[in-house]
Amino acid sequence: MTTKVTGPELASASIGGGNLPPASRGSAPGGSGAQSPSTSTSSSDVQITSAAAQLAALEQSLMAQPVVDPGRVAAASDAIASGSYAVQPEKVALGLMKTEQALAGLFGAKG
């Protein structure tokens, strides 16, 4: 079985069922060996949502970013070592609230 996956701003990709174990190819759930309609050899199209496309684009952009910024780590380490690092509670609280609002927007929560 071949499935065509498409979505907004994404190129089409074909996914073949060639790697399925022999028992699952063309057999019904009861194991009778009869081919079920969902495992026919014709192709079917799958549309992904715009949210999934956005997540895929975000994943690609994050993969291009370095995991750690060595310059920021060095600056923070130096500030801590010298005793000049100061936590700004208002800034921390604001960042937490913004993160919460962004997550609520993703999951449709109100509050």
Image (cartoon, rainbow, N blue to C red):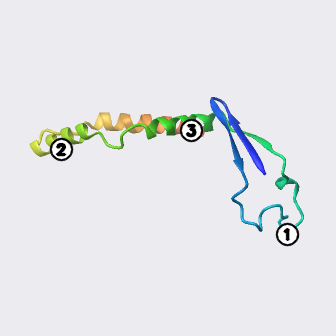
Please give the name of the residue rendered at 37% of the width and 35% of the height, measured from the top-left corner.
Answer: 95
Q: What residue type is labelled 2?
A: Ser
Res. 98 image quadrant: top left
* Disc 3 to disc 1: CB gap under 8 Å: no
Dot 2: within a 10 Å radius of its alpha carbon, few (fewer than 14), some, or many (20 or more) residues? few
Res. 21 image quadrant: bottom right
Q: Which of marks 2 and 1 is nearer the N terminus?
A: 1
- Image coords of residue 76 (percent x, y): 20, 41
Residue farthest along the bottom direction in this orientation: 31
- Image coords of residue 105 (percent x, y): 55, 35
Q: Label 1, on which residue?
A: 30
The secondary structure type at the circle numbered 2 is helix
Q: Is residue 111 visible?
A: no
Q: Label 3, on which residue?
A: 56
Please give the name of the residue rendered at 84% of the width and 70% of the height, measured from the top-left corner.
Answer: 31
Labels 2, 1: front one: 1
Q: Which amino acid does label 3 sit on?
A: Ala
Q: What residue type is labelled 1?
A: Gly
Q: In the displayed structure, would residue 104 be above or below residue 27?
A: above
Q: In the displayed structure, would residue 17 be above or below residue 31?
A: above
Q: Earlier in the sequence, mark 3 or mark 1?
A: 1
Residue farthest along the front direction in this orientation: 18
Labels 3, 2: front one: 3
Query: Whole-Å distance between the Cαs marked 3 and 1?
Result: 36 Å
Please give the name of the residue rendered at 83% of the width and 66% of the height, measured from the top-left corner.
Answer: 29
Please give the name of the residue rendered at 37% of the width and 34% of the height, measured from the top-left corner.
Answer: 94
Q: In the displayed structure, would residue 74 be above or below residue 21?
A: above
Query: Whole-Å distance between the Cαs marked 2 and 1?
Result: 62 Å
Q: Label 2, on which residue?
A: 77
Q: Which of marks 3 and 2 is nearer the N terminus?
A: 3
Instruction: Compare residues 70 and 43 and report the one nearer the observer.
Output: 43
Q: Can residue 22 be seen in this view?
A: yes
